[in-house]
Image (cartoon, rainbow, N blue to C red):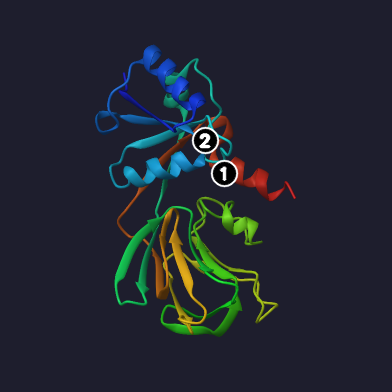
Amino acid sequence: MAKLGFVASDTEEAQKAQEDLSARYGGVPAHDADVIVALGGDGLMLQTLHEHMGSGKPIYGMNRGSVGFLMNEYREDQLLERLSKADVTTIRPLEMTATANDGTIHKAQAINEVSLLRQTSQAARLKVSVDARLRLEELICDGILVATPAGSTAYNLSAHGPILPITAQLLALTPISAFRPRRWRGALLPNRARVDIEILDPKKRPVSASADHTEIRHVTHVSVCESTEAVGVIMFDSDHGWDERILTEMFRY
């Protein structure tokens, strides 16, 4: 029988679920588990994926939070049977390399997206290159993001970016409230592409960069590409897999 490791968010509902499931199915520390069961919302799922990136351990989430796009329905019964039938999907995170205005270099990974946002009332002025070729001399906007297929239904969708099938070998490059060029709606890039974003006039128009939950303030340059090494593993119930969830989102509007 597979050894299960239960992790939960801090909410009372999630903690109670962890207690009940551990009593029913047993539980081991996450690093000793064959499968990690995450109880909470999408935030906990992202945190758990980050913590176990590259370990090969599959993460199976059950929704005990407010947002649960990455989670399965919470049910206590037949958990082992659900796990044995679950679809397994591997995902590769983005790697962000951000240079701050003091010259320090920061690296972080993002499962959903890397986003750049203005820090003040002044709009950001950005220069965008793809694979070392200049594509936008000047983009005036609130920000810009690079999203994975996994993250295409998150912040990217709210910014009117495209929804990507989970198996698509693409990245979404999406502006946030673009002022100039006003008609530019973003681009679809091959997942092997490298995006470089230079912040123009960073002292007057400061910009922050975030890779999921990791934020770097006052950046001058950000480089984003898909990781060639790190891999996360996520599990979904076979009757409601990730492809089905994304198709549902596509036809919801």
Q: Earlier in the sequence, mark 2 or mark 1?
A: 2
Query: Residue 111, percent across and down?
Result: 44, 52
Which SS class for mark 1?
A: helix
Q: Amino acid at mark 2?
A: Met
* Residue count near mark 2 (Cα–Cα under 10 Å), binned few <14, some 14–19, many ≥20: many
Q: Residue furthest left?
A: 32
Q: Nearer the viewer, residue 27 or 167?
A: 27
Q: Residue furthest right?
A: 253
Which SS class for mark 2?
A: loop
Q: Do callouts 2 and 1 mark residues in contact (Cβ within 8 Å)?
A: no
Q: Nearer the viewer, residue 101 or 130?
A: 101
Q: Residue furthest top?
A: 24
Query: Residue 232, percent across and down?
Result: 37, 46
Q: Nearer the viewer, residue 252 or 155?
A: 155
The residue under the point 37% across, 70% down is 98
Q: Quadrant of the N terminus?
A: top left
Image quadrant assignment for residue 25: top left
Res 71 label: 2
Res 220 label: none
Residue 56: tell me if it is visible.
yes
**44 shown above or below 117:** above
Horizontal relation, residue 67 to residue 97: left or right: right
Query: Residue 209, percent across and down?
Result: 45, 66
Q: Nearer the viewer, residue 203 or 186?
A: 203
Horizontal relation, residue 104 to residue 83: left or right: left
Q: Amino acid at mark 1?
A: Asp
Q: Which residue is mark 1?
A: 243
* Residue count near mark 1 (Cα–Cα under 10 Å), binned few <14, some 14–19, many ≥20: some
Separation (CA) of disc 2 from disc 1: 13 Å
The residue under the point 42% across, 25% down is 84
